Image (cartoon, rainbow, N blue to C red):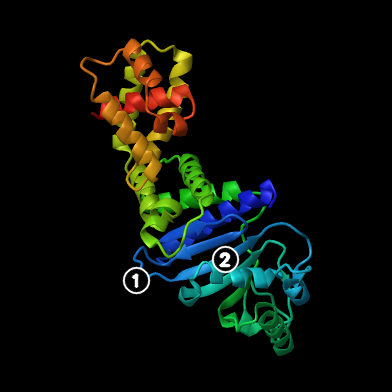
Amino acid sequence: MTADRFSYQYDWALHEFLELHHRGEASIVFVELHEDVVFGTSLDAEETSFIFCQVKAGGKSGYSSQALIKRSGAKNSILGKMLSSIAVKDIAERVQKLGLVATRGFSLKLKTSGFRLEEIPFSELEEKTATVIRESLQTELNASVPLEKLHFREPSLDTRSTRHAVIGLISDLLTERNPNQHSNSTQIYVVLTDELRRKGEIAWDYSDWDQLVMRKGLTADRVEALFAQYSSTVSTDELINDFDSQVRELGFLTRDVKRLRERARTYLLNTLAGGALVQVQVRDSIREHLSTLEAVLCRQTLESLVNSCAPVVTEHLRDRESRAAAYIIEYLRS
């Protein structure tokens, strides 16, 4: 996928997850490389079922039935690839819905003509079209396929303004919780998309559910932790105010304070309840390092701590300002 299409996949996944979670229909989302997005209905391994989607961005003309089943040499067709993906993940029996999501839309013959559906269930296809697709896939995959679960969907999320649309949805959801709260929806968006992208690069076995949830999923609990914090931001705002005072006491110049404050707020968001495992490891490492401090934090001591921090900190807090901000935050928290 190109960079633009890749970005669309993540923005669509987050937008859809927020809407599904808001309706009580999803508790976790996994984003895979190469177009797959999987929503889980529960965090309980015994109870969860899946909504499996493939997201295709770009192109001008709608997909015809022939385009969906066309093969190039030994490669799978578009629908063949999608159906074989759920078999590889060993989740076919738990998939309640299959969604092929395409920004270019679809040009498919329906049982009832003269109107347009945003989402087309396979059962709404004209019988001849449905038969051609079914027989082609049975030949391609050498097996019967669960086409009754298949839906074709043209997303409402515009490819030209996905970021603004997701930020707008976050803002709407926060306003619904607290109409008088002025929240930084953009920062929440950045934190959530960053987590989705990092975890999207991880390949993991769907049979190892607990590890899959921890290492690859973005959970509703994580979203709720961020939303709850921004629906009642007193503790964060107070800590940031204390942070501003502390950095000035440490002798940082005014021009540096703003950058450090931004790093501090990002660090706070990343270490809220439900944050990624690596963020918890970074936080714990910094706290353990600070436990060796025997006096009040001064500029020289801060520089020494940042210089000697653990590899997990330098690996995930890439610049020196981020590391300094994290140490100051944890010092204030202690």
Q: Is residue 300 above or below residue 94?
A: above
Q: Is residue 282 above or below residue 143?
A: above
Q: Residues within 10 Å of mark 2 (few under 14, many from 20)?
A: many
What numbered label is drawn on residue 134?
A: none
Q: Is residue 264 visible?
A: yes
> Secondary structure under badge 2?
strand
Point 57% across, 52% down: residue: 10
Residue toward you, 305 or 262: 305
**Left/right of residue 208 with respect to residue 95 in the rendered view:** left
Farthest bottom residue in view: 127
Point 60% across, 72% down: residue: 83
**Left/right of residue 83 with respect to residue 96 in the rendered view:** right
Query: Type of residue at label 2?
Result: Cys
What x and y, as percent, mark residue 4?
68, 48
Farthest left residue in view: 294
What x and y, as percent, mark residue 296?
23, 15
Point 67% across, 46% down: residue: 3
Query: Type of residue at label 1?
Result: Glu
Q: Residues within 10 Å of mark 1 (few under 14, many from 20)?
A: few
Q: Which residue is mark 1?
A: 46
Q: Is residue 180 visible?
A: no
Residue toward you, 64 or 184: 64
- Mark 1 and mark 2: span between their CA atoms? 21 Å
Tag 2 or tag 1, which sits nearer the N-term? 1
Q: Which residue is mark 2?
A: 53
Write down the quadrant of residue 291 in the picture: top left
Residue toward you, 115 or 262: 262
> Secondary structure under badge 1?
loop
